[in-house]
Image: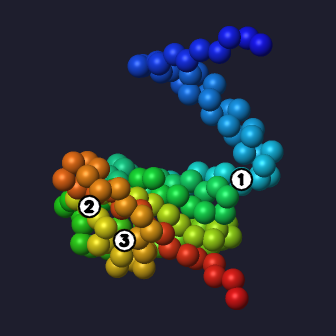
């Protein structure tokens, strides 16, 4: 057998990452079948078309994961965040997703997500120090 070693790469390249990701994705495909991966971006733009914020997500294994949602502070409280989430939920329903999940820090918007019908399913305390990272989900398609 070939000698196996480990090497810490402090500044990895995209090729370093793909060398790990690609065989992992192949393994997952073998075990679960098609993950039905689809990216989603919904932008929040001004009249000139300048993107000011928005939502970025990806659907796989019949769940939508919202990895980014940003509304500039001056535009908050006017329903833009709710609209972005609603559009993502409608898109996810159309893609027959079971639900949506996301995470946020306590200094960001956990109360906002709760108002939108999301429930917390986990947390990491002291991440970052003095705060917590909260994980939320919302079921979309409930089987009867």
From the image, tell me which residue sits under label 1: 35
Between 103 and 112, the one nearer to me in the picture? 103
Q: Earlier in the sequence, mark 1 or mark 3?
A: 1
The nearer-to-camera label among 3 and 2 is: 2
Crowd rating for badge 1 (residues with CA inside 10 Å; few <14, some 14–19, many 20+) = some
Please give the name of the residue rendered at 68% of the width and 37% of the height, measured from the top-left corner: 24
Outermost residue to the bottom: 144
- The numbered mark, 3 or 2, whose residue comes first in the sequence reads 2
Instruction: Return the residue at label 3.
Output: 113
How far apart marks 1 and 2 lie (CA) works out to 31 Å
The quarter of the image holding the N terminus is top right
Residue 71 position (above or below residue 51): below
Q: Secondary structure at mark 2?
A: loop
Which quadrant is home to the C terminus? bottom right
Task: Report the Cα–Cα distance between label 1 and label 3.
Answer: 26 Å
How far across and down, in percent of the image, does residue 76 sit?
24, 66
Residue appearing at x 74%, y 40% in the figure: 27
Instruction: Identify the image quadrant of residue 103.
Output: bottom left
**Percent of width and height locating residue 136:** 43, 67
Q: Residues within 10 Å of mark 3 (few under 14, many from 20)?
A: many
Residue 48, visible in the rendered structure:
no
Mark nearest the camera among 1 and 2 is: 2
Q: Which percent across, then down, holds residue 74?
A: 19, 61
Q: Quadrant of residue 4?
A: top right
Q: Is residue 112 above or below residue 68?
A: below
71 relative to 9 in the view: left or right: left
The answer to whether residue 139 shows anywhere in this view is yes
As rendered, which of 15 and 82 lies closer to the eye?
A: 15
**Numbered badge on residue 129:** none
């Amino acid at each position: 057998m070939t000698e196996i070693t480990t090497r810490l790469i402090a500044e990895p390249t995209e090729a370093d990452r793909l060398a790990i990701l690609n065989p992992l994705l192949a393994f997952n495909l073998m075990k679960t079948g098609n993950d039905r991966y689809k990216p989603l971006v919904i932008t929040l733009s001004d009249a000139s078309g300048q993107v000011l914020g928005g939502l970025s997500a990806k659907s796989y294994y019949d769940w939508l994961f919202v990895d980014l949602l940003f509304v500039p502070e001056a535009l908050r409280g006017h329903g833009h965040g709710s609209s972005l989430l609603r559009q993502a939920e409608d898109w996810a329903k159309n893609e027959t997703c079971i639900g949506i999940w996301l995470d946020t820090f306590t200094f960001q918007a956990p109360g906002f997500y709760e108002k939108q019908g999301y429930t917390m399913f986990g947390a990491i305390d002291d991440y970052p120090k003095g705060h917590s990272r909260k994980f939320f989900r919302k079921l979309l398609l409930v089987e009867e």
